[in-house]
Amino acid sequence: MYPFVVKAEYYDFDSDEQKTIFCLLYGHDITEIASRMKDYCDPEDIEIHCVGDEAQLFEVSEEIATSLRLGCGNYASGQEILQENKENAVV
C-alpha cells in the first residue's frame, strides 16, 4: 500500500456548511482512495497525491504526535483536547 495525501471539499449536512478536510491515507491506488473518500464524505471536489512508497515514514513534531494520540488518530479532535487542557490549567 502507498501513502496518499487528500484534500476533499464537501458539504456537511449536519452543520449546513461547506468544509475542507485533509487526510493521509494508505491504499493500493488512487481509485481505492477516491472510493474511500466518497464513502467518508462524498466530496464535491477532491485532490489526491501519492507522496511516497510502501516503506515511507513520516516524521512529525511532538505536538502533532500528541494531538493524533489524544484524538485517537483525529488531529483536529486532539487539538481541541489540548486547547481544553490549556484553558483548564491552573496557573
Image (tube, helix red, strand yellow):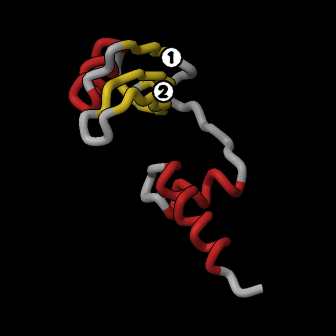
Residue at image position (36%, 31%) is 17
Residue at image position (53%, 54%) is 68
Q: Residues within 10 Å of mark 2 (few under 14, many from 20)?
A: many
Residue 42 pos. (x, y %): 25, 23
Q: Which quadrant of the rendered structure holds the C terminus?
A: bottom right
Q: Of 14 and 7, which appears nearest the observer? A: 14
Residue 88 pos. (x, y %): 62, 79
Residue topped by disc 1: 50
Residue 76 pos. (x, y %): 51, 49
Residue farthest to the front, as pictured = 16
Numbered circles on residues, count: 2
Residue 8 pos. (x, y %): 42, 22
Q: Of 24 and 9, which appears nearest the observer? A: 9
Which secondary structure, mark 1?
A: strand
User: Residue flagged by tag 1: what amino acid is it?
Assistant: Cys
Residue topped by disc 2: 3
Q: Quadrant of residue 79?
A: bottom right
Q: Quadrant of residue 48?
A: top left
Vertical placement of 68 versus 87: above or below? above
Residue farthest to the left, as pictured = 39
The image's mark for residue 18 is: none
- Cα distance, mark 2 to mark 1? 6 Å
Task: Indicate which disc, 2 or 1, sits on the residue closer to the N terminus.
Answer: 2
Q: Would residue 75 appear left or right of 16 to someone viewing this image?
A: right
Residue at image position (48%, 27%) is 3
Vertical placement of 29 versus 91: above or below? above
Q: Would residue 50 appear left or right of 87 to someone viewing this image?
A: left
